[in-house]
Amino acid sequence: MRQALIDTSAIYSLVVRADKNHEAARVLLKTWLKQKNAFVLADVVFIESMTLLKSRFGSEVALKVGRELRANPVYLWMALGADGERETWEVFQKYADKEWSYTDCALLALSQHLKTDHVFSFDSHFDQMSTVKRIP
């Protein structure tokens, strides 16, 4: 079984049918799961996703998606914890010249910690990270 981190942009594209990346997200999800792979869902991505979905679509949508992400075993929950947060802060400072969000930095730090080099994302910031490959 392979693992890839999942980013907020991928969750958003999976949920929002009108999103330009919706179909690509669905295809990747279907292919990934068919191969019996899983996604690592960082707590910061969950927080960011819930905030975004609630602000754009309301509590009902955010709760429905949040329950699915928490209950479905294909999403492996990963809390950053104190060490992960410290590593994220180090990455955030080191790459202050980039437009990477704090969550982007958390996923980079987490990818290094887990030795996972794939991130399911539509965020082009990951293309700037030499140790991470964005899928699709």
Image: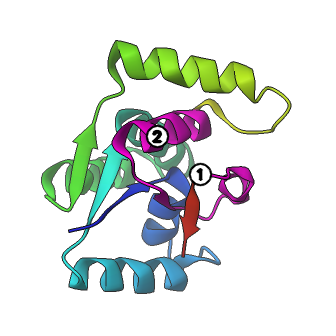
Q: How far across and down, in percent of the image, does residue 15 sit?
A: 43, 67
Secondary structure, mark 2, is helix
Q: Earlier in the sequence, mark 2 or mark 1?
A: 2
- Residue at (32, 51) in percent of width and height: 40
As shown in the figure, which amino acid type bears the numbered disc 1?
Answer: Thr
Q: Is residue 102 left or right of residue 70?
A: right
Q: Is residue 84 left or right of residue 68?
A: right
Does 109 lie within the magenta span? yes
| Residue toward you, 132 or 82 | 132
**Image spot of residue 10 (x, y percent):** 50, 63
* SS assignment at label 1: loop
Res 110 quadrant in image: top left
Above-or-below relation of 48 to 133: above
Q: Is residue 41 above or below residue 27?
A: above
Rounded to the nearest angstrom, the CA distance separating label 2 from label 1 is: 8 Å
Residue 76 is tagged as none
**What residue do we see at 24% from left, 42% from top?**
77
Q: Label for residue 112?
A: 2
Q: Residue furthest right?
A: 97
Residue located beneath label 1 in the image: 131
Does residue 73 belong to the magenta stretch?
Answer: no
Would you call the spot at circle 2 few (<14 residues within 10 Å), some (14-19), or many (20 or more)? some
Q: Position of residue 60 (x, y in %)?
A: 33, 51
> Are there few (<14), some (14-19), or many (20+) residues within 10 Å of tag 1?
some
Tell me if 75 is positioned left or right of 119 in this view.
left
Q: Residue at x 37, y 49 (%)?
A: 62
Q: Amino acid at mark 2?
A: Gln
The residue that appears at 51% across and 85% down in the rendered structure is: 23
Residue range (magenta): 103-130
Q: Position of residue 18 (x, y in %)?
A: 58, 77
Disc 2 + disc 1, Cβ < 8 Å: yes
